[in-house]
């Protein structure tokens, strides 16, 4: 899939660039923000000590860029929680019950990320009513159902999270093929919520699975906002739904939500840390992270969604304003349909007039002072997650910018493009 390739390339170059950079540049808003964060708080700035320079996030909630940052309320809740020990299972249970109420579903579990939720949810379906099987999977599948039905266009870079449980995929394309694919080995059906393609709708997907009494899972990891998605898909009938805790929800990066049917969530809990000898034992979520995700959900549910989206739009417009008058530069605001459903600024220009590729712009911004990360769709030769891209297209993700940083991004972009226009 083109999308997957784009992301892989992006991971590759980012990793190298991050590793190669040992500078301790820090200026403008980051410096101020870090001074403010340190203000009064006892402790060492270990980014500084380790020589790892933070950047201005003009990309979005990308995993290799450490995704989102947590709102102050969330950081404060984590700090309080970190001071006292608790019974981990009691905390998991209480947080699950609280989240299920707030998110209007039967049951919920805080996991070590959406990918962990995919593994635990699959393990739940495979081992439901058969606890001995928890030790044997993924190698000993004796007597276990092991087929997961999926649309061919929904195969993606998280397949491995499900395959950790010993399953194999049965691919379908048409509704007819889907209906015919169920058999005595079928254990689950899987849906990738933000898939660009696929002929079968969510509603049809759920309806047919339930006709066969088979649970269906929806991976909506990056699909907040809208906030209502937190209950849209469980209400639609999906038996399991996952969201990443560290993307639009803005909790700790190493958390995720597994929402859905009570019996399946209970089975997921049994396959999870702190239970030893389970597929989930390596997916431990600490008390600080559990509390962090609960606090982040509370924070998110208290937000005015329209106001948030308008603020993102204002940031995009301010950056566009800052580029006015540059030769051949055109700007547009674009909102991806499903994942990362927030205003992005898309910038195009005539490469005969501004002699830089998008990739070169991305690299110059990354190496500049302060460091700035543009959206990975910048300069990409294939479309990425509903965002336009092209060799001479720049994409600015504005939703993770801190106050004032839109001005810094505009100024640096202008410098880079102006210099190339003079060349
Ligand atoms: C980000 C993402 C994941 C993984 O989420 P984590 O919380 O990082 O584990 C899974 N599926 C999709 C579609 C994603 O976008």
Image: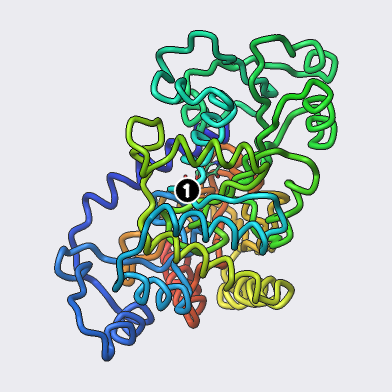
- Image quarter where the N terminus lies is top right
Q: Which residue is mark 1?
A: 111
At x 62%, y 54%, the residue is 340
Residue extending farthest left: 49
Question: Does the beta carbon at disc 1 come under 8 Å from ligand 1?
Answer: no
Q: Badge 1: how crowded within 10 Å, few (<14), some, or many (20+)?
A: many
Q: Is residue 245 above or below residue 188?
A: below
- Report the label total: 1
- The image quadrant that residue 292 belongs to is bottom left
At x 28%, y 44%, the residue is 16
Specify whether 135 is left or right of 58. Answer: left
Helix, strand or loop at mark 1: strand
Q: Is residue 363 visible?
A: no
Front residue of 72 and 241:
241
- The image quadrant that residue 364 belongs to is bottom left
Front residue of 207 and 4:
207
At x 61%, y 37%, the residue is 264
Q: Is residue 418 visible?
A: yes
- Image quarter where the C terminus lies is bottom left
Front residue of 284 and 95:
95
Residue 87 position within the rendered picture, expressed as x and y whole percent measured from the top left:
37, 58
Residue 305 position within the rendered picture, expressed as x and y whole percent measured from the top left:
70, 72
Residue 383 position within the rendered picture, expressed as x and y whole percent measured from the top left:
61, 40
């Amino acid at each position: 899939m083109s999308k997957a390739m784009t992301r892989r390339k992006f991971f590759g170059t980012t990793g190298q660039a991050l590793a190669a950079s040992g500078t301790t540049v820090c200026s403008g808003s980051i410096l101020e923000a870090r001074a403010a964060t340190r203000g009064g708080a006892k402790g060492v700035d270990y980014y500084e000590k380790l020589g790892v320079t933070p950047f201005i996030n003009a990309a979005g909630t990308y995993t290799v860029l450490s995704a989102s940052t947590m709102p102050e309320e969330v950081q404060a809740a984590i700090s309080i929680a970190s001071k006292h020990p608790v019974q981990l299972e009691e905390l998991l249970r209480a947080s699950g019950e609280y989240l299920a109420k707030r998110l209007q579903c039967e049951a919920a579990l805080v996991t070590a990320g959406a990918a962990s939720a995919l593994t635990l949810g699959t393990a739940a379906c495979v081992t439901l009513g058969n606890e001995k099987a928890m030790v044997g999977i993924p190698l000993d599948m004796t007597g276990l159902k092991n087929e997961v039905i999926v649309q061919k266009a929904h195969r993606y870079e998280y397949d491995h999270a499900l395959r950790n449980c010993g399953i194999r995929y049965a691919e379908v394309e048409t509704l007819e093929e889907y209906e015919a694919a169920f058999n005595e080995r079928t254990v689950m059906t899987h849906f990738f919520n933000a898939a660009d393609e696929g002929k079968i709708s969510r509603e049809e997907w759920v309806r047919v699975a339930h006709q066969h009494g088979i649970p269906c899972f929806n991976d909506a990891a990056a699909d907040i906002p809208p906030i209502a998605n937190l209950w849209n898909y469980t209400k639609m009938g999906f038996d399991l739904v996952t969201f990443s805790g560290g993307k639009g929800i803005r909790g700790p990066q190493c958390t995720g939500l597994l929402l859905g049917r009570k019996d399946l969530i209970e089975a997921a809990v049994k396959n999870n840390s702190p239970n030893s000898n389970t597929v989930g034992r390596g997916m431990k979520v600490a008390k600080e992270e559990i509390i962090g995700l609960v606090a982040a959900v509370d924070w998110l549910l208290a937000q005015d969604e329209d106001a948030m989206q308008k603020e993102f739009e204002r940031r995009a417009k301010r950056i566009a304003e800052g580029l006015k008058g540059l030769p051949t530069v055109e700007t547009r605001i674009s909102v991806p349909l499903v994942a990362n459903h927030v205003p992005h600024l898309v910038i195009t220009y005539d490469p005969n007039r501004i002699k830089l590729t998008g990739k070169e712009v991305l690299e110059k911004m990354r190496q500049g002072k302060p460091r700035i990360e543009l959206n990975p769709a910048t300069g990409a030769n294939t479309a990425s997650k509903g965002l336009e891209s092209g060799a001479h297209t720049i994409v600015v993700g504005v939703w993770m910018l801190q106050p004032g940083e839109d001005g810094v991004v505009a100024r640096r972009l202008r410098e880079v493009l102006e210099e190339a226009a003079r060349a």
